[in-house]
Amino acid sequence: MTTFLETGRLVLRAFTATDIDVLFALDNDPEVMRFINGGRPTSREAIGTRGLPRLLHDYPCWKTRGYWAAEEKPTGTFLGWFEFRPLEEHSPAVVELGYRLNRAAWGRGYATEGSRALVHKGFAELGVERVTANTMVVNTRSRRVMEKAGLTFVRNFTGDWPEVIEGSEHGEVEYELTRAQWEQRR
């Protein structure tokens, strides 16, 4: 197990092929997936052929992953995952921040704690110049995590998504934090 980052309560580690069962459980909770695909179940095959390979991908600019399994530090319990991946394979300048946590982890500050730690590591160690994140307008909990992590609202937009899910008619929002903003706040 390769640990990427530790906080007071979390360990973010590299995914392995053996994580398929915890990913299957996470992606089959309708509330967890509500703002991703409308809460529809994800097949084990889809997780194995599409989801897991994406989570195992190494980015050449960092020679490491962009998705991290989140575990509770004292117990090793799988909580979900964090995304902190370069938008371009060979450049760490702009990264996307994201998270997907199981319901038992909601409301406990894990998303904010992990996001803040990733933002700090990105600017302090990884050469990041801009962190971006987006979600549906109606996903107020995720938007609040972005704000607590230091990102600020940039714009509303609408995407051309293949499937309509409840709330998508309101569009999406983008948040960001630049290196200059981060340094100013330190």
Image (spheres, grey):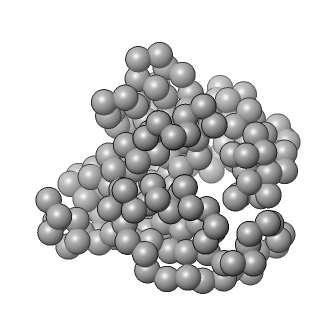
Tell me if 31 is positioned left or right of 97 in this view.
right
The spot of residue 46 in percent (x, y) is 81, 46
The quarter of the image holding the C terminus is bottom left
Above or below residue 75? Residue 53 is below
Residue at image x 62%, y 50%? 54
Q: Work out whether 12 lies above or below 182.
A: above
Relative placement, left or right, of 45 versus 70 is right
**Relative to residue 96, is residue 138 drawn left or right?**
right
* Residue 144 in view: yes
- Camera sees residue 68: no
Residue 96: x percent and y percent?
47, 63
In this rendering, is residue 143 above or below 74?
below
Q: How many marks?
A: 0
- Measured as percent of width and height from the top left, residue 112 is found at 41, 47
Residue depicted at 56% across the width and 27% down the height: 78
Q: Nearer the viewer, residue 125 or 80?
A: 80
At 21% from the left edge and 54% from the top edge, which residue is drawn?
Answer: 124
Residue 57, compared with residue 11, is above or below; it is below
Q: Which residue appears farthest toward the top when viewing the image?
A: 75
Indicate the quadrant where residue 114 lies.
top left
Residue 1 horizontal/vertical position (percent):
46, 25
* Residue at left offset 74%, top offset 54%: 34
